[in-house]
Amino acid sequence: MHMHTLRHITAALIAATLITACGKETPPPAPKAEAPKAPEVLTVKIGSASPLTGPQAHIGIDIRNGVQLAVEDLNAKGVEIGGKKVKLELVSEDDEANPTKATTVAQKLVDAKVAAVVGHFNSGASIPASKVYADGGVPQISPSSTNPDYTLKGFKTTFRVVAHDGQQGPTLARFAVNTLKAKNIAIIDDSTAYGQGLADNFEATAKTLGAKIIAREHTTDKDTDFKAILTRIKGKKPDLIMFGGIDPQAGPMVKQMKELGIKARFIGGDGMQTPNFIKLAGDASDGAMASIPGLPKDQMPGGKAFLEKYKAKFNQEVELFAPMGYDAVFVFVEAMKRAGSADPAKFLAEIGKTDYQGVIGPIAFDDKGDLKNGPITIYVVKGGKWEPLEIVKPDAAPAATPAASAPAAATPAPETKK
Amino acid sequence: MEIFAQQIVNGLVLGSIYALVALGYTMVYGILGLINFAHGDITMIGALVSLTVIQLLAAAGVPAPVILVLAGGSAVLVCAILGLSIERIAYRPLRRAPRLAPLITAIGVSILLQYSAALIWGKQYISLPEIIEPAQFTIFGAQLTSLQAAIFLLACTIMAGLLWFIKASRMGRAMRATEQNPDVAGLMGVNTNTVIAFTFVLGSAIGAIAGLMVVLYYGLGHYFMGFMLGLKAFTAAVLGGIGNVGGAVLGGLLLGIIESLAAGYIGDLTGGVLGSNYRDIFAFLVLVLVLVLRPSGLLGQPGGERA
């Protein structure tokens, strides 16, 4: 704002120095000032939108840093699109993890004529923003939003590089039935969109794999007493209990299972894969399992090198989604290269054809814009800590057991439509 | 049979906590004709205070029995002071006001307590460090932990003690006199202000113990935890006949058992049409039935203006 008015009234030279001075806030310095001098260098703006303030700021900044690192790496390497040298410029916006702010920020990025956007972090922000990007014709890759609805709006501009909840449920079910050999399964959910969706997806796949669902119970995301439900389940003698919900319920639930003497295994989704779950459940948490979309960060194909590079640059550890943000920029630039243009209208079609080996592994999209073969990692609590137990690829897993592959392959279609 | 016994045990433990909280509602209602909607949140404050004390002392390595006594003591102290101040500041000035006014203040105090707690303790769930590993044993095929047994026995002791106190002690007699007719009791030399203040202190202190029990039982606390607990306890008080101390005990235990059985068997009874998530509906359905058939509650005096 400040810079804007000054630029109109002061001489070009002063403006140029001012932009350089402010460069610390907008990381890649002075490309605008250089552009007129060297007309053959094309500036391509890459937007990044994530919460940079508030309680989720550490995750949002992590994503922004990943994008920034990709922009700098690409600039250092030199990019050519359609025979022209290209300089990438990062435009970073703060959506405050707020759906309303997200649409404002999205409009701002569209108006700033960014070629592509990496964002947002929260599903609640990514979904409303996706309409703004679609209307503006700007392609969007979310590094982290897992709500299935995000890619179900029918927008051609919407992509993500993380497995979604509709893939998590079936994967958990395959793990429970094929790997853990669970036969009698009880399912509890917390009656939220997330928890019930996850549990529904789990149930559908577990049934097709031949497991028996002996009880389907519901609680709420406010309850802490599950004794009655668990007692009922105990009477049906399950060998596995699946919970769709988050840690404030999962913790006491596992504790009460132990108190009731239920020996069944306990498994859930990413909502309970938190340190808080272990705190709430105490010793009873031992052996509980939960899944998280994506690979453990040090086991990503390009993970080690990336973690070191990130540490050297920002002097802090990768939180979670920086590698996804990093890869998203490369996916965009590769698509631009193939199309020979940085015009979204021209390279958008190429994003869908992406076949890229990124830090997080191979990246390809299905026709909805979801990550194909998004890996999911199952973690187990061991000695008061979550430890990676097994990595499951949604489509690869059933191939291992040919008998199971036919029904399993048939399941994803109805599940994602929940 | 084992499962049935287990559901009854679950229900009794849960119900004894409801009953303790219900006592606070019913005592105040008996004397003032006021539904103290802030009572659930006083319980919440008691729970969070004891949680904090347990966290601090457990980190300092104090032995578990000492921690429990200190946690209970500080919760009782804080809640007693809180109950006393709420009565003095929010209710006493409105004692002669139309009945709707103190009801609104009560809701205001409830919200004030919730958001003050959110400021102090934050909005996330707070977990309890494990200080005691409860022993497990089996009765009639039902699993019971020593903690559950202790909660149930302590609750019963408190309830029996309170019933005796109201029946036999001098203060108890003053409380009953004030309940029957505050003006006449005043003329007979009972200091009704003291009696009413004492009732709030007593109810809040018992609520604090209930809060400590909830924290120990579930291992977590939350600034909003008093809302549902208060609603259930209020229901229990109405079920048993609000204003009647014995009724609160009966109502609490009954509500706990109804909830457990509903959650355990509603699915089987309805062929899976209704799940365990409808247990609250079942509990309130019983309440509606009781109120239709016996408007003053199970043990309430029929025809009383207060029921």
Image (spheres, coloured by chain):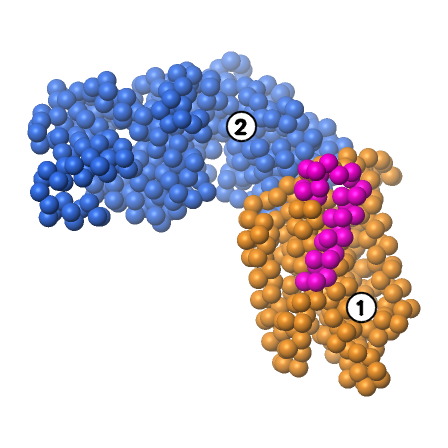
Chain colours: A blue, B orange
Q: Say which amino acid is labelled 1.
A: Asn
Which amino acid type corresponds to the residue marked 2 in the rendered image?
A: Ser
- Residue pictured at 73% horizontal, 44% vertical: B216
Is residue B263 visible in the rendered structure shown here?
no
Residue A320, position as x, y percentages in the image? 44, 29
- Residue at x 21%, y 43% (from the top left corner): A111
Q: Which residues are magenta?
A: B54-82
Which residue is the site of mark 1? B244
Q: Which residue is mark 2?
A: A291
Q: Is residue A144 visible?
A: yes
Task: Residue A289: give x, y in percent of width and height.
Answer: 60, 27
Residue A169 in the image, given as x and y percentages of width and height:
52, 30
Please identify the dominant SS of the magenta region: helix
Q: How would you rate the neighbour count of disc 2 (Cα within 10 Å): few for under 14, some for 14-19, many for 20 or more?
A: many
Total labels drawn: 2
Residue A246's quadrant in the figure?
A: top right
Q: Are marks 1 and 2 on the same chain?
A: no
Q: Is residue A233 above or below residue A78?
A: below
